[in-house]
């Protein structure tokens, strides 16, 4: 799992963290893809799925999990509140 879901050069941390998915199996690649459902396109290293991987990341592998607001990117969040980068910090 680590080989295709842990990035070492993503925008959220200088430490390794889990991604939602890597489109080509390379989690460090700067690949932009559309999130679907009329949403935006985003760099795969900026799309984190905390619910699917937090237990594995923290408990089993010792890799810090980056937890942010779920669905703020996909559903655009609350204007000026949860749809801004600072809401994930």
Image: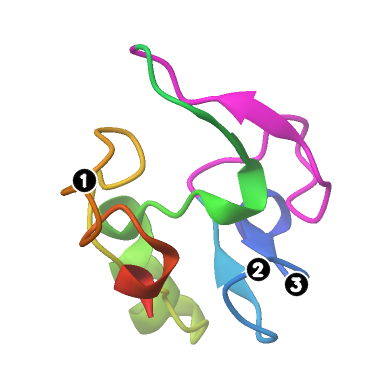
Residue at coordinates 70% horizontally, 64% vertically from top-left?
7
Mark 1, residue position: 77
Q: How far is disc 3 from disc 1 in space, using C-alphas? A: 27 Å
Question: How many residues crowd mark 1 within 10 Å: few (<14), some (14–19), many (20+)?
Answer: some
Res. 62 visible in picture: yes
21 with respect to 53 (left or right): right
Q: Nearer the viewer, mark 2 or mark 1?
A: 1
28 vs 62: above or below: above
Kindly identify which residue carries mark 2: 11
Where residue 14 sits, quadrant-wise, is bottom right
- Give the left or right position of residue 21, taking residue 4 as reference: left
Q: Position of residue 54 (x, y in %)?
A: 32, 68
> What residue do we see at 57% from left, 54% from top?
46
**Which secondary structure, mark 1?**
loop
Mark 3 or 2, closer to the camera: 2
The residue tagged 3 is 8
Q: Nearer the viewer, mark 3 or mark 1?
A: 1
Q: Which residues are magenta?
A: 20-37
Horizontal and vertical percent for residue 26? 80, 45
């Amino acid at each position: 799992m680590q080989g295709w879901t842990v990035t070492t050069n993503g925008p959220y941390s200088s430490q390794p963290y889990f991604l939602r998915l890597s489109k080509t199996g390379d989690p460090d690649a700067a690949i932009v893809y559309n999130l679907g459902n009329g949403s935006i396109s985003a760099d795969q290293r900026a799309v984190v799925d905390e619910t699917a991987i937090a237990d594995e990341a923290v408990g089993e592998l010792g890799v810090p999990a980056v937890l942010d607001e779920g669905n703020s990117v996909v559903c655009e969040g609350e204007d000026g509140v949860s749809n801004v980068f600072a809401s994930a910090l």
